[in-house]
Amino acid sequence: MKKLLIGLAAIVVLLVVAVFAVPAMIDWKSYEPDIAKAVHDATGRDLHIDGDISVSVLPLSVSIGEFRLSNAPGMPSPEMISVAGVDVKLALFPLISKSIVVESLVIREPAIFLEVDESGRPNWIMEPAAPPAPAPAPADAEEGLPISGLELADVRIEGGLFSFFNATTGQAVQARDINIKVALADLASALTIAGSTTLNDEAVTLDIAIDSPQALLAGNRASIDFALATRHGSMTYGGGAQQTPVPGLDGNFDIDVPSVGALAAWLGAPLDDSQPDPGPLQVHAALTADGAKATIESATIKGESLDVKASGSVDGSGDITKIMLDVRTGVLDIDRYLPPPSDTPRQHGDMSGGHGKMGDAMAAIPDTPFDLSGLRQTEADINVAIGGIKAWKSAPSL
């Protein structure tokens, strides 16, 4: 019996050693062709893993070196996505109780290039090289969250880059030195996200705090603070949020832009030289959510040529969703927000859009009938009062 116990103990020790030691002995890089083929079949793009791949069980960690995803053909940048490396470390034993403890997750120098070519084709539309496999039948939904706990100890994005270029308009936006840090002690504690970047040579900061992600995921109310700040404007929200019985916010939302013209120029879409700067713009909304009713208690949009006030609600407590909206404005001078009119006058009877439609604006309306059957479950009461509209003061005669 003693020899049998010794033998069983030796087998157990060998199995434990194998479980913890074998993953480190596997040449994970040899699986790169299989991974690249799966990615190419799903996206039509080529994946290149230039760095090493390592896996460890104790501690439970995965490390992937530099990798790149090719861009769509004909785009300016050779890659759509590139990452200098990803390191993940998880606590092993909490997984037994379906709790995830991320001891560290660091994404180093991720770069994303979103581009639109001269024909208007965006590079983020993927074309699978192989037909997708049929989706598995959905499993029976289980009540509650799929995990019992989540802890994010050290989650970071370091030195990221985001670039957007539209060849049809010439708009170019680049955010560099993107740094984001996420922290969460547990699902019932506050989730905090702090980020900073340099967007088109101007500093931008982002701060988000959710007091209880667990409450929000369970459909209950959670408090949220959001702040986005730049030299050209700010956006803030402070209050609560709910997902059920209807999505709604319960707090104050504000946007403050010192100069719409300066903001547009900073974002790579400057106004025409002949168009005046619309000037400052302020947006404020006081929102409430009470059960199945979400309400805009008051909303204002103010600028040098704008003065809009609104209120309304969405009530989903009954069989029919009830929508109420009341909008009132003074005289709107929308010339300040529109591009200047074309210098080329259009001749009378010019129907350049073809098929009896005047211009491209009407030609853009599809011939497919609109499906409005969903409105049968909706009751709307909408009132709009406009003091006047000033537009096209220098428009060419038709």
Image (cartoon, grey):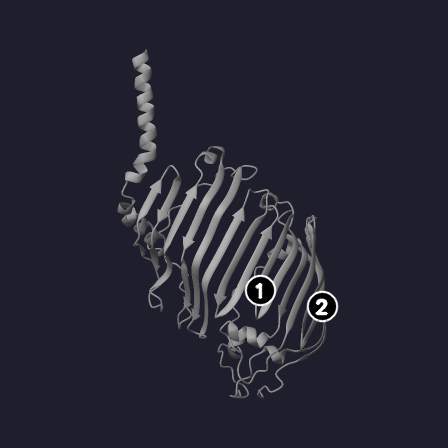
Residue at 48 percent of width and 40 percent of height: 100
Q: Amino acid at mark 2?
A: Lys
Query: From the image, which quarter does the C terminus lie in?
Result: bottom right
Count neighbours of disc 1 (C-alpha within 10 A) and say few if under 14, some if 14 to 19, many if 20 or more. some
| For discs 2 and 1, the disc positioned in front in the rendered view | 1
The location of residue 259, given as percent across then percent down, is 60, 75
Q: Secondary structure at mark 2?
A: strand
Residue 362 appearing in the image: no
Residue behind mark 1: 229
Q: Relative to 178, is 216 above or below?
A: above
Q: Is residue 136 left or right of residue 332?
A: left
Residue at 68 percent of width and 62 percent of height: 285
The one nearer the camera, 345 or 125, is 125
The location of residue 269, given as percent across then percent down, is 50, 75
Count neighbours of disc 2 (C-alpha within 10 A) and say few if under 14, some if 14 to 19, many if 20 or more. some
The one nearer the camera, 87 or 111, is 87
In the image, farthest residue toward the top: 1
Residue 172 is drawn in which quadrant?
bottom left
The one nearer the camera, 392 or 264, is 264
Q: Is residue 73 left or right of residue 94?
A: left
The location of residue 119, given as percent across then percent down, is 40, 72
The mark found on residue 309 in the picture is 2
N-terminal label among 2 and 1: 1
Residue at 58 percent of width and 55 percent of height: 208
Count of picture labels: 2
Q: Secondary structure at mark 1?
A: strand
- Tell me whether circle 2 and circle 1 mark residues in contact (CB < 8 Å): no
Query: From the image, which quarter does the N terminus lie in?
Result: top left
